[in-house]
Image (cartoon, rainbow, N blue to C red):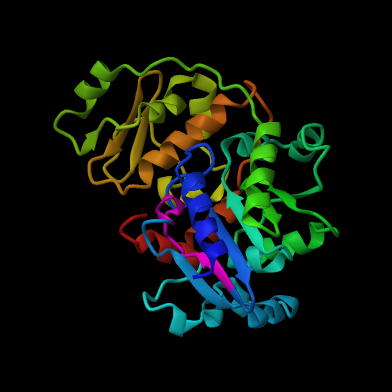
Amino acid sequence: MSPELGTLRVLSAKVGSNPLLVQAAGGNTSIKDGDIMWIKASGAWLRDAVSNDIFVPLDFSRLSAALAADDPACEACTDFVRSALNPSGLRPSIETSVHGLLPQRIVVHVHCVNTLAFAIQTNAEALLTPPLKLFNWAFVPYARPGLMLSRAIKTALRPGVDVLVLGNHGLVVAADTVADAAVLLHEVVAALDQPARDFGSANTDRLEAISTGTGYRLPEDADCHAIALDEWSQQRGCSQVFYPDHVVFLGASIPDTLDAKAPAVAVPGVGTLVRRDAKPSIEPMLRCIGDVFRRLPRNAPLQALSRQQVGQLLNWDAEKYRQTLKLS
């Protein structure tokens, strides 16, 4: 392991431990080290980057050539894994093609809550222009992660761009050292910082009464309740999908009454409940939608994912694989 990969592990764990930047197995980081690109494994949690072996080595020259040729193998990128250096058999991140496309050595992709609050609005690019005026940035309209997204990035890239805001998705920063990437990430996130509205507190007594004798429980993280406590936010955030990880882990909607199949329920004006057998990803994703809506102006014009775009995610082999992992 190169010293800088070790440094990237530390940054990854720090970023992955911040719920306003990364939720559950979301987000990914990478480093191009000679002819190898190390990238976070699909389904791994960035917060575990120091304690666990979560990086996958890929043959960077082969990946680059395949991206230039728009090779379908770049959809999953498993063909480019250096198997001899990957004894755990981990699969590369579903967004490996994005990392391989950017020329900088270090790439950090996060699902920053403040970024999402801009990126899900219909006029996202115009709203982002003032706070990002000092950065060399580009806006990329929504495209399904993977090869579709890398194609969209190719269209938007200009020489020197080191910040990407992905519509309905998140933030990417790139630099040639881990230290520079960390500074850039901090500066962009600070520029996009927005105050969070106070939605009040959950009625936990009522939730306890509702959940007694059912397969549901109160979430451990009290911030998970936010999405249920504001009428406009609950109506919009629970009935539509605004970014990929929401549909992958919470489904196409969050019901407002108990549903044996739903991983979470948002009781209007009361709070949320999660299934007792919910995977570890459910609470972080439930909190995220509330964190995003708390940073939106009331009645902001929003751009939800279409039914077709939701279907693309639910039927995508790479996402089906990620959902089978125990920690996801």
Between 100 and 106, the one lying in front of the other is 106
Instruction: Specify whether residue 243 is painted magenta.
Output: no
**Chain part drawn in magenta:** 37-49
The C terminus, quarter of image: bottom left
Q: Position of residue 229 (x, y in %)?
A: 44, 20
Residue 61 lies left or right of residue 138; in this view the side is left
Task: State whether residue 306 is above or below residue 114.
Answer: below
Residue 103 lies left or right of residue 63; in this view the side is right
Regarding residue 246, the answer to whether it shows in the image is no
Between 41 and 14, the one lying in front of the other is 14
Q: Residue at x 59, y 55 (%)?
A: 308
Residue lying at the far front of the rendered structure: 3
Q: Position of residue 21 (x, y in %)?
A: 54, 41
Regarding residue 186, the answer to whether it shows in the image is yes
Q: Residue at x 23, y 46 (%)?
A: 277
Residue lying at the far left of the rendered structure: 213
Q: Position of residue 148 (x, y in %)?
A: 66, 64
Instruction: Specify whether residue 41 is painted magenta.
Output: yes
Q: Residue at x 67, y 81 (%)?
A: 61
Residue 319 lies left or right of residue 172; in this view the side is left
How many numbered circles does the render carry?
0
Between 164 and 324, the one lying in front of the other is 164
Q: Position of residue 55 (x, y in %)?
A: 47, 66
Task: State whether residue 149 is above or below residue 87.
Answer: above
Residue 200 lies left or right of residue 102; in this view the side is left
Task: State whether residue 106 is above or below residue 182.
Answer: below
